[in-house]
Each structure stands twice: as structure tokens, then as C-alpha cells.
Amino acid sequence: MIFFKKISVNPFELFPRDDQLLEIIRQQLDLVNFTNCNMNSQFEIFQLEKFGRVYNFLGVPHLSPGNEILNQTIIEHIARFFDSSDSPLMGSIVFVENVDELMRDNWDVLSIDKKEKKRCLFYEYIKKIKLADLPGESYFVIQKALEKGYEVFCPEPSRLVRIIAALNETQKNSEFSYDDVIYYEFFASLHGYFNSKIIQSLNKSELNIQINEFSTKFSKVFSLSVDSIQSLLHQVVEKLWHEFDVNMIDLDYLISPDILSLDTHGHMINVDQQMVKTIRKVPTFLGKFRDQNIIAELFSALKRYHIIMVYGIGHLYTIKPVINYLSTLPNDN
């Protein structure tokens, strides 16, 4: 049995985020050259010191349903990373990827008392998850953080904030349209459903259920009727897959940023379609928007805390060069 130490600090009252750096971060992200990135790299550690504090980053692949060997390797790397950490308990915080309950956006609307109660209930839920039932590696990261006594924070904007940012971007002569945002968000949701069910394809009748559920859930977000969203999604599915079942390999491609060159072997969709190209510009925009927020939170937190961060390996290629640049700025920035 694992005994969890008393958590050290309250992540939602920890530090003000310094948004004055956002423009500098945007400029630096635009300079990132992905052609030199080793996309075959799976695990990497990066360390940096700034403001008299240490930032430790472990990049890992995401847990892959059904791939027990890879998943066990990921768990072992994360466990060793925490076991080797010498960050002081009372001055450190763990940054974890894509956990809604720990995002700043989802907590600012709550009173301090409600934050505390909701957070404690969430932690109790996390403690009870068995390794075989982990929804993602982030939940094991939280378990290890609580075991060590560290507090946990997710430095990302919520999905709603990201969607609103993408929709606003379509009003600025963007490379993608309002409909492209809807398509991308549906394919991202569908990708998550595939992972949760450990499936590789979906027939039309099952797909219709997912379309109906997504349309109902996101009708208010997109300010469109359920019928309108359903119609858009049925049209895009027909154009991309025709009579074929929707499959995982195509979803992987559709939700990947267009700045990445991916293997197209085995695809059912025509990856050269203009529709595919514009849909993939949405995750490119959202990736930069997400990373600029992560980096702003990270650099703001470093002024007060040592940071332990476990994230998908792909984020290393954006975070590392920008943080290296920011570390050269005077400490009053």
C-alpha cells in the first residue's frame, strides 16, 4: 500500500501568470525548426536553472492502449525520474499534461473552499486507480507526485479556451475555417474514443452515434444547432472515407500538425486533399497556442518554485529552445 504525504502547497493560489512574455514566446515558437527534431526519440531529460531554481523535464511517449511493453517502459521511466528527483518538498511543484481538473482555467471560477474540496476529491480518485486502468501516463505522474508529497498543476488552457482561440483565429484571415475547427475537434474526440475502447476502426452505424453525441455536446460551444453540426460531420466523413470505415491511422494523421511530415502508408483517406491540409492547420495553431500558455505558466512558476515536468516528448522540441532563450533574459523579466 502506498501512503501519500500531506500535499505541500495549493497550486491554484501559487503564482500569478506573467502574460507580458506571451508575445516574446509567440515569436520564439515561430522560429522553432522541426526539420531537426528527432521524431523517433522516445525518452529525454532536459534540465535548466533560472531565478535560482531548477527545472527538470522528462519527455515520454504517450501510453498506447494494447502496447503493454511500451506502456511498462513508460511507467518505469517515470518512476525512476521521480525516485531520482532531489527537488525540495516545500519549494517544488509537478507540471502534468492535459488534466482538466488541474488547469487554471477550470479553477479560477471557483471559490478557494470549493477548489480545495474538489481537488481533494480528485486526488482521492487518482490514488485508487490501478496501473492497468490508467487513462494516461499523466495519472501515474500524479500518483508519483502525491506519493512524494509534491503538489500538482496542469499549465495548459482548457479545451474550451483553446476552441475559442481557434474560432477567433478564423476571423483573422486564417489558413483554416470555422468548419475546420469543428472537424478537428470531432476527429480529436473520436481519436480519444478509439483509444478508450482500444479499437482501430469504426463502422458507419457506430460512427453515427459518436457524431450525434459530439453535436449535442458542442452545439453551444460552436453556436450552431445540433442538426447543423451533424450535417457538417456527415459531409466531411463522406468526403474523406466514402464507403470505408473510419480508422485510427487516418485519425492520427488528421489531428497531427501540418508542420510534421508523417508516414501515409495504409491510409484510406487521400492525404493530398485540400480539406485534409486545412484541417491539419488547426492542430498546428492549437499546438502553438497551447505551448505558449505552457511556457508562460512554466516561466512564471520558476520565479517561485522548482519544477518537475513530465510531458509528451514532442513538447520538448518547442519548450526547450524557447525556455533556453528566456533563460538568457535578465531576471526582472
Image (spheres, rainbow, N blue to C red):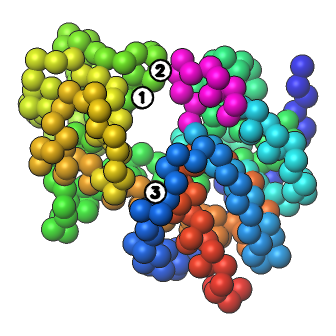
Point out residue 15 in the picture as x, y percentages from the top left corner. 69, 66
Give the amino acid type for the residue marked by disc 1 in the picture.
Answer: Gly
Is 8 left, or right, of 280 in this rendering?
A: right
Residue at the spot of label 1: 192
Residue at the spot of label 2: 196
Classify 10 Å Cα crowding around label 3: few (below 14), some (14-19), many (20 and above).
some
Residue at 19% from the left image edge and 50% from the top image edge: 277
Disc 1 + disc 2, Cβ < 8 Å: yes
Give the amino acid type for the residue marked by disc 3 in the picture.
Answer: Arg
Q: CA distance from mark 1 to mark 2?
A: 6 Å
The numbered mark, 3 or 1, whose residue comes first in the sequence reads 1
Point out residue 225 in the picture as x, y percentages from the top left corner. 14, 34
Q: CA distance from mark 3 to mark 2?
A: 23 Å
Point out residue 254 in the picture as x, y percentages from the top left corner. 28, 40
The answer to whether one can see residue 142 in this image is no
**SS class, disc 2:** helix
Residue at 29% from the left image edge and 33% from the top image edge: 265
| Location of residue 220 with respect to 107 vertically, above or below | above
Classify 10 Å Cα crowding around label 1: few (below 14), some (14-19), many (20 and above).
few
Disc 3 + disc 2, Cβ < 8 Å: no
Q: Which mark is residue 290?
A: 3
In the image, the segment drawn in magenta is 62-74
**SS class, disc 1:** helix
